[in-house]
Amino acid sequence: MFNRRSLFAALISTFAILFHNDALAQSVDRSKTIKEIASLRKELSEKEKLFLSPPAEDLAAFAEFLKQPKTGLIRLLPRGLYDDRLTIRGGGAYYSFDRLTHEYGFGSDIELMTPPNENYVPPPIAEYNFHTGFAGADYGLIVKLGDVPLDKVTLEHDGVKFLAAYRPPSAIHKARAEQRRADDGILRGQYEYKWDAPAIVNYTYALRSIYYDKSDVLVSFRVVRKEIDGSVVILWKMLKRFPTPALQR
Amino acid sequence: MFNRRYLYAALTSALAVLLHFNALAQSIDRSKTIKEISSLRKELNEKEMLFLSPSAEDRAAFAEFLKQPKTGLIRLFPRGLYDDRLTISGGGAYYSFTRLTHEYGLGSDIMLQTPPSTPNDDYVPPPIAEYDFQTVFAGANYGLIVTLGDVPLDKVTLEYDGVKFLSDYNPPSTEPKARIEQRRAREGIRRGWRGYRWNAPVTVNYTYALRSIDYRNSDVLVSFRVVRKEIDGSLVILWKMLKRFPTPKLQR
């Protein structure tokens, strides 16, 4: 009886040790896997940042301009072309001049749009469009200023004055009406202010982006080049940051 | 004058060639980078699949059961705990028994929830007592879960006492009625001593049945059992599809 009890206890202890070791090994394995995932994600994020960054050549060419505060040089990828090849939300097609990120979903000011394309073949530049205003009552207005050096675009520029003086409404129904006006386009003299504009290399634009409860910015930007991979390099300058607009619902 | 023209032409050509080579080099670099990104994503995807898959030990233990059609063994993570550590949408907290994927956003049948107050910044899994299975509400979709207790999964059939109500259940085809059913699911429906609700507390070694109604996509009755809770907070779940109903339609 004593021997049987001892044998039983020994067997139970052995099993307990074996199972414990197995569980421990599994847990160590899984903890190793999650560390490897973290490391891969970091590496991937760095590669994506590199892929989204503008060419060193352009950074050098605009070094003087970029010394000014609230300026930047970015790359935008056409929407849909890289969505399933990059992990960044929005596939590099969006940018927030307020948050300085391509990440979509937390408020973006601009989007580079092209017709749907599943072959990873960049469409011709003639099919590229800039869009603004993406959610809720938020909206924006873009104006095409033509081949004007970015340095010459100030708040007093003819095409910018309307955007600088523009006051976004605070009532939701009025904001919706303004959204519709932005859809149709607003004509002021020789300039048209719309929610979208065709992208043209060496053209300069001004954008007023109204993001209720978050930001309201006036930015000028210039299309520096279109690359073989379909991306567009954009030089930009923040002209004015307005008080955050509030929306009465 | 002649020489000047030649010099100008030569300089322009040299510049054009240089710029062309520069553009070409840049394009090759970028094409290399996107290939590296693609390769990293593939590797990451494989690692995530490994992390989401149940252990070989569990697969071996349930090998006989898993030989049956429409069965599976999955791992679920509590919502929020791995959201920012995994690239899969939903962080491994959702599962679709029809599409057989954890990917959230295209229709899921179940979600593993922990209380919103549970701090998850430190990646500390909460105790099992705080885990909840939830059916996924989107639009007019809803589901009902019943806790069957410590019953072997093999014993749970369409005729099983707690399953019959779910098996006989007819989802409505109009939106107002579907909304009423959603509210009933939230409040809970009592049949005898069983309660059918949109959620159920998680208990290891307990078996559950779930009717998940996803209008225009699927309508399934699944039984599942919590095999274990792991140190990292994940649950290993053995499941069996009891019935696949005709896809429900919704008249709006």
Image: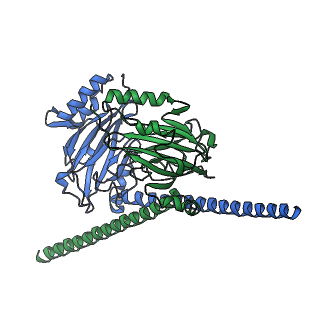
Chain colours: A blue, B green
Judged from this view, the residue extending furthest toward the front is B159
Judged from this view, the residue extending furthest toward the left is B2
Residue at image location 20% in from the left, 35% down from the top: A183
Q: Position of residue B76 (x, y in %)?
A: 52, 50
Along the viewing direction, whichever of A66 and B114 lies nearer the viewer:
B114
Residue at image location 28% in from the left, 70% down from the top: B24
B155 left or right of B136? right
Residue at image location 50% in from the left, 30% down from the top: B191
Q: Which quarter of the rendered picture does the C terminus of chain A lie within?
A: top left
Along the viewing direction, whichever of A83 and A56 lies nearer the viewer:
A83
Q: Is residue B11 above or below residue B128?
A: below
Along the viewing direction, whichever of A164 and B56 lies nearer the viewer:
B56
* Picture mark count: 0
Along the viewing direction, whichever of A156 and B169 lies nearer the viewer:
B169
Q: Position of residue B198 (x, y in %)?
A: 48, 35
Q: Position of residue B103 (x, y in %)?
A: 42, 50
Q: Which quarter of the rendered picture does the N terminus of chain A lie within?
A: bottom right
Q: Is residue A42 visible?
A: no
Q: Is residue B28 visible?
A: yes
Q: Position of residue B202 (x, y in %)?
A: 58, 42
Picture quadrant of residue A12: bottom right
Q: Is residue A143 above or below residue B62?
A: above
B184 left or right of B246? right
